[in-house]
Image (cartoon, rainbow, N blue to C red):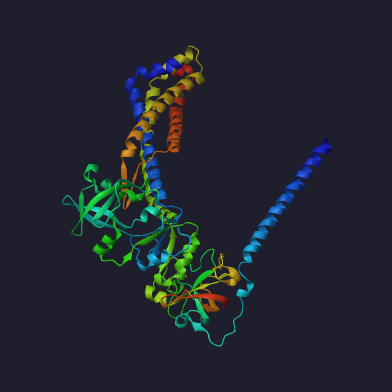
Amino acid sequence: MKKIIMTTIVAGLVLGCSQKEETKSEIQAVETEKIELISADSFGHIEAEETLTVTQARNKNAGDSIIVKGKIMGAISPFVESRAMFIIGDPETITSCELMGADDHCKTPWDTCCEPKEKLAAGTISVQLVDEYGKVIKQGLQGQYGLDNLKHVVIQGKVSELSNADTMTIVAEKIMVK
Amino acid sequence: MFTYTLLNLIKSPVRTFQLILAATIVLLLMLTAGAFQEGMKQSLSISGDSKNVILLGVGSEESMERSEVPFSAVSAAKTIPGIEESLGSRAVSPQIIFNSVVTFQGKDFDAILRGITPEELLVYPAISIQEGRFPNSGEILVGKMAYQRLGIPKENLTIGSEINYEGKTFTIVGTFAAPGTTLESEIWFNLNDLMAITQRDSVSAIILRLGDAEFDDIDLFTKQRLDLQLSAVKESDYYQMLDRFYQPIQTMAWITAILIAAGALFGGLNTFYAALMSRKKEFATLQAIGFSRTKILMTIVGESLFVHVLAFLTAAIIALYLFPAIHVGFGSTYFSLSLTPSLILATFLLAFAMSVLVTCIPAWHCLTPPLNNLLKD
């Protein structure tokens, strides 16, 4: 009788553990799938003779190839939580709040709340990574390959067809975090 | 023993009445504080719909009244895929909201004015027009609690009445209900009327109702259209933020109620103490003729329980009838005191705990000393 009970307990434990293992591997599979949405090829070193500032880049037209440098800033949260998109600003024309010196005047250090709206609109660009259908990848970029608020980045890509004289979006092919 | 307990209560009706009154005050105060909290919480939480997203001007994420959104953002927002749609109209509702002074029957009143379009009913399905119809130009719709906000009798603010604002006359063509929300205390104008009067070319905010889209799609839109300088805020988060703003007021209400209740509790304790100490000899005699201390203690607690149950019933009945008629206003928020089953249960448990608590000290003094000492007293 004792043997039967012991065997049942051991069998239960083994089955329980293997089910847990299965669940773990399922979660890992989902996570891996998630990470794979953003390709590692989108990040790396960019060789460029001439890099434009955000303000200079604003003169380019939709469809133009471009290499632009900027700083991740320009909003309370420059990243979209679960979409491959962020905002870069021109550090030469826009001052982010961490450089302002005074405390408590902005909600976040990467906000640019003290700048006039017109200056902000002219000195910021959206950067996005798209899938093969041209849709923005449904995964956040913050924390990926060193990308974070206030980081200086160089973007190589094309000016999106959605861009016009008032607003610009770059479809990134490669992102370099400085 | 039960008959003895009841007879004791009837024997001194004035004393019993005093005890019930003291306990009723304590319980009513606790119910009031709880109902105040619930009313404010419900008003703020229902106002935030989890499917709604508010587009506000950058830098004004905490105040719709302060925010400015360019009117061109309305047509741009309508292009976002996945917004809820009904009968060909997209649930995108631009609006202007601010506090101002309106004139009614020759007197000036402070009011919350909102300029809206028919899409407002798409983003807030809970809103219903109770009487009349949606306003056209020169007409207004009033919330069913707007009369409270204006401080005038309800019957004065009916369909056909006229309100003046900035020298123009507006006729009331309907009343609306938005259960438990702050919207009910507002006066709604046609958006174009309010934009023309205030000479604005921007709106305060745009409210969107999500269909298949997620919040991040709206956030993505605001970051793609940097020229519009918009911020997307979940409506539930916006009202949670307001809730945090009102948190100190709620805490203050609790502290005030607890302090007053503590005073009333000590008063009740004193009354109970005096009432029981005057019967010290009676309890000693009961012990002398053979009743155990436990039985006498049970009688004392039984009396107290009876008093507190009566007090609870009185307080609950007063609250049930009185609270819905009490409307409280804080800035742009108006709400009724709200009773919930959990609050009533909590008050009953408090009454039960109090009934035991107030008898502890007098019972100790009446029952623990040696019997001969008590009889000599």
Q: Nearer the viewer, residue B14 or B360?
A: B14
Residue B71 visible in the snapshot: yes
Q: Nearer the viewer, residue A74 or B362?
A: A74
User: In the picture, which quadrant includes the C terminus of chain B?
Assistant: top left
Q: Is residue A72 above or below residue B155?
A: below
Locate residue B339, reporting x and y percent: 39, 38
Locate residue B317, reporting x and y percent: 36, 31
Locate residue A118, reporting x and y percent: 37, 75
Residue B59 visible in the snapshot: no
- Residue at 43% across, 52% down: B49
Residue, far left = B106
Residue, far front = B87
Q: Is residue B299 above or below residue B172?
A: above
The image shows a total of numbered marks equal to 0
Residue, far bottom = A49
Q: Quadrant of residue A141?
A: bottom right
Locate residue B128, reporting x and y percent: 35, 47
